[in-house]
Amino acid sequence: MDFRINKSAITARVKAKSVYILALLDQIVFGATASINFIVLENLISRDTYALLATLYSFIVLYQLVSNAMYMDAFVVNLPQVGIDLYRPYFIYILKLFLLVSLISGFVFGSAYLMYAGVSARSVSDFVLFCSAATSFSLMMFARRLCYSVQSIGKSFLGSLVYILLYAAFIAGGYYLEILSLEYIFVSLAAATFGSFLLVAARLGVLGRLRLGADAGLDRARLRGFHREYAGMGFVAGTLKWIPDNLLFSLLGVWSTLDHVATYRMATNLLMPFRHFIASLVNVLLPKYSHLAVDGRSAEGWRHALGFIFLFLAVSGGMFAIFWFFGREILDLLYRSNIEPVLNVILVLSIVPAFSAAQAISGTFLKSTGKIKGVVLQSMVGAFLTILLGWQLSTRYGAMGAAVTLVISMFAMSVFGIILVLRSQGRKAA
């Protein structure tokens, strides 16, 4: 009997480690592609177009962050209560909510944009194209989050590969045909992400249930109440979370120059694999910590979280050492532009993976225990510091000022999040 118990425990640990390994592989592929995309495009398009692409892409990330915080975070946290066997109809319920809100928000923001830009075939097509790319990107990330929630990370990896291959084929074709414009890049992004979403959703059996119109078996009244309460907090948390990473591109564009936008984008490209890996851990850890919280074992989840935070402290130290000794050689291989300002910025940003992990994992733990207001407060700290410092430092110091702002904001959020967790665990122990 004891042997069987030990054998079962060992099997569970091996399975858990295999999940992390597959998640790491998935996110290395997905995150590296995001970096490579902007590295390659820097060599193919003009610097002003590159800077404009970086700024507009940050708003696509905003929509994805907000929509995931409103709907998929709620889905993951609430799934243990609904029942894992109902994940397909519950996911369909989430998709319907997302598409409805997308239509409403598209109408509102589209009307505002057309009032500003003027009604013309060009302005309408530009806005529709941008909305299509933002919505498709969010749908792809929804499907990938679903894979992590139901322990089907192999399907997420397949979706990542399909997205990469489709997007690369579009970009290569556009370059060959000499039509690699900003509009064409967004068409490529929309098509590739939507194709990835369809594949993953089909592999998980969601599309089949969608054809049947099946969201039966759900307590819709309870879900409506839960999502009304969660959506408001999720909207605020997702919006605030976007500010430290992405508002800086807009601040640089307004208060500095497009050249500084490009420099900052070139430096942050090299952080993307680490940031995406942290995102993959969050996708794995939120379901795990939610189950532990339901079982009354949240302290075990926090010890687990601390291990990952210390791991990323080591990663940041290694990253700084690599770019201190070999930074010029690495950047010379990647970019055609002057790399000296990029090197200085990346050295400052090398500490960001550690702070990003501490902020994201502590926030994930708070979500898992139902303390979404703590996550909002944590995000407010980062947003406030980014806005307060960003416009001053980006005006005076350009890309370097943006880098310093990001480091300060991420550090403050990580410390604040850890304090909130420790206080909650202390109250629980008492």
Image (cartoon, rainbow, N blue to C red):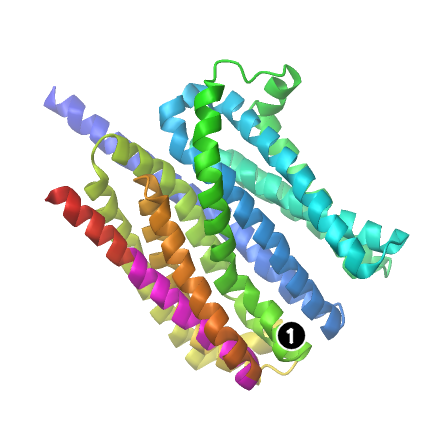
x then y, percent, for residue 148: 45, 37
Q: Give x and y (percent) for residue 163.
A: 64, 44
Quadrant the N terminus occupies:
top left
Residue 304 falls left or right of residue 378: left
Instruction: Tell me, yes or no, if residue 152 can be seen here.
Output: no
**Callout 1: few (<14), some (14-19), or many (20+) C-alpha neighbours within 10 Å?**
some
Residue 428 image point, x, y percent: 16, 42
Q: Is residue 231 visible?
A: yes
State the extent of the magenta-drawn residues as a range: 396-417
Q: Secondary structure at mark 1?
A: helix
Q: Main secondary structure of the magenta part?
A: helix
- The residue under the point 45% across, 76% down is 404
Residue at 58%, 53% in the rendered image: 61
The stretch drawn in magenta includes residue 269: no
Q: Is residue 288 above or below residue 327?
A: above
Residue 240 place in picture, x, y as percent: 48, 56
- Placement of the C terminus among the 4 image quadrants: top left
Mark 1 is on which residue type?
A: Val
**In the picture provided, is 385 more to the left or to the right than 402?**
left
**Residue 411 painted magenta:** yes
Residue at 20% across, 36% down = 297
Q: Name the residue located 62 percent from the left edge and 16 percent from the top edge.
A: 213
Residue extending farthest to the right is 121
Task: Examine the rendered structure and indicate whether residue 355 appears above or below residue 1.
Answer: below
Q: Quadrant of residue 329?
A: bottom right
11 or 425, nearer to the observer: 425
Foreground pick, 323 / 213: 213
Q: Which residue is mark 1?
A: 254
